[in-house]
Amino acid sequence: MATASPFRSALVTGASSGIGEAIAHQLGGSGVPTVLVARRTDRLEALAARYDGFEVLTADLNDADDLAAVVARVQSTADPVDLLVNNAGFGTSGSFADLDPDRLHDEIGLNVQALTRLSHAALATMVPRGRGYLLNVSSMAGFQPAPKLAVYAATKAYVTNLTESLHEEARGTGVHVTALCPGLTKTEFQSVSNSGSYATKYPPFAWLPVEAVASAGLADVARGRALSVPGVIYKGMAVATDVMPRRLVRRLSALVQRGSD
Ligand SMILES: NC(=O)c1ccc[n+]([C@@H]2O[C@H](COP(=O)([O-])OP(=O)(O)OC[C@H]3O[C@@H](n4cnc5c(N)ncnc54)[C@H](OP(=O)(O)O)[C@@H]3O)[C@@H](O)[C@H]2O)c1
């Protein structure tokens, strides 16, 4: 039976796998009509077939026309989106100078530009409406520099920073804005970002269940938290990076990444 949800409707980007797919399942299980966005239509259609009121919107968020279609859907007044989950994102592991600059351009395009455009569409629609929810999926990687994952960490630092600012701007408007900052979570991210070696390099306790990440994000945006950090270990790490000297954080981060070569 569907459990009560604070969300009247939702749109989830990157709903074809991993964290976005898990969020979509939880929304579907709670009876929330949800628009599924990603490039792989077949995956989205299979997911949509499982729940009432699900809609498929195939889009490459690095394509201007596709992004405009998603913006229009977020801004619909006829069929409003109550919760926007900006989840689509990817990373690129390796030494910065060795990486393909076109891929890094696309990474910034998706993680930063598309997310910013969609966040703007959401708040421009939700604030006048006096209600709504924006959940931006960032990362623990955004709390410190990450040598060998440098552009990814920089994009996620942007996402966390932007989202915290928007959280304060939206205070008192009835709109909740939250940055979800997961640690290691087994999804397609590891193969897409060329960080498959993490699976054996990091101990089992370091990995978060994808369902727990999804439920933490949904619960924290419902509660109106600025930051959502799933898991006690990662909550502790987030506090530690806040209080440790920056040069120490940077060196530790480099050592951790060296261990994942
Ligand atoms: N897994 C982790 O350890 C981890 C940790 C912290 C944060 N995160 C963040 O969590 C979010 C979800 O990642 P995940 O771990 O679930 O990875 P994933 O399984 O690779 O999922 C990424 C999703 O993004 C979609 N996507 C990629 N490029 C796209 C594009 N150009 N346009 C539209 N959709 C696109 C993919 O769908 P299509 O390929 O079908 O388009 C897929 O649904 C990302 O923002 C990631 O940075 C992940």
Image (cartoon, helix red, strand yellow):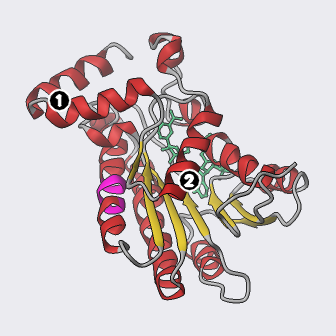
Query: Would you name the residue on which mark 2 appears?
Result: 88
Magenta region includes residue 206: no
Q: Residue 29 at x, y = what percent? A: 80, 49
Exactly how many numbered labels are in the figure?
Answer: 2
Query: Would you name the residue on which mark 1 appears?
Result: 250
Of callouts 1 and 2, the N-terminal one = 2
Distance Cα–Cα, label 1 vs label 2: 27 Å
Local crowd size for mark 2, using a 10 Å CA cut-off: few (<14), some (14–19), many (≥20): many
| Amino acid at the residue labelled 2 | Ala
Q: Is residue 35 left or right of residue 196?
A: right
Q: Is residue 248 left or right of residue 94?
A: left
| Amino acid at the residue labelled 1 | Arg
Up the image or down, 222 lies above or below 211; here it is below
Question: Residue at horizontal 62%, vertical 72%?
Answer: 82
Q: Residue 96 at x, y = what percent? A: 29, 37
Q: Is residue 78 left or right of residue 108?
A: right
Question: Residue at horizontal 47%, vertical 72%?
Answer: 175
Quadrant the C terminus occupies: top left
Local crowd size for mark 1, using a 10 Å CA cut-off: few (<14), some (14–19), many (≥20): some
User: Quick one: SS at disc 2?
Assistant: loop
Up the image or down, 112 lies above or below 194; here it is below
> Which residues lie in the magenta part?
158-163
Question: Residue at horizontal 40%, vertical 43%?
Answer: 100
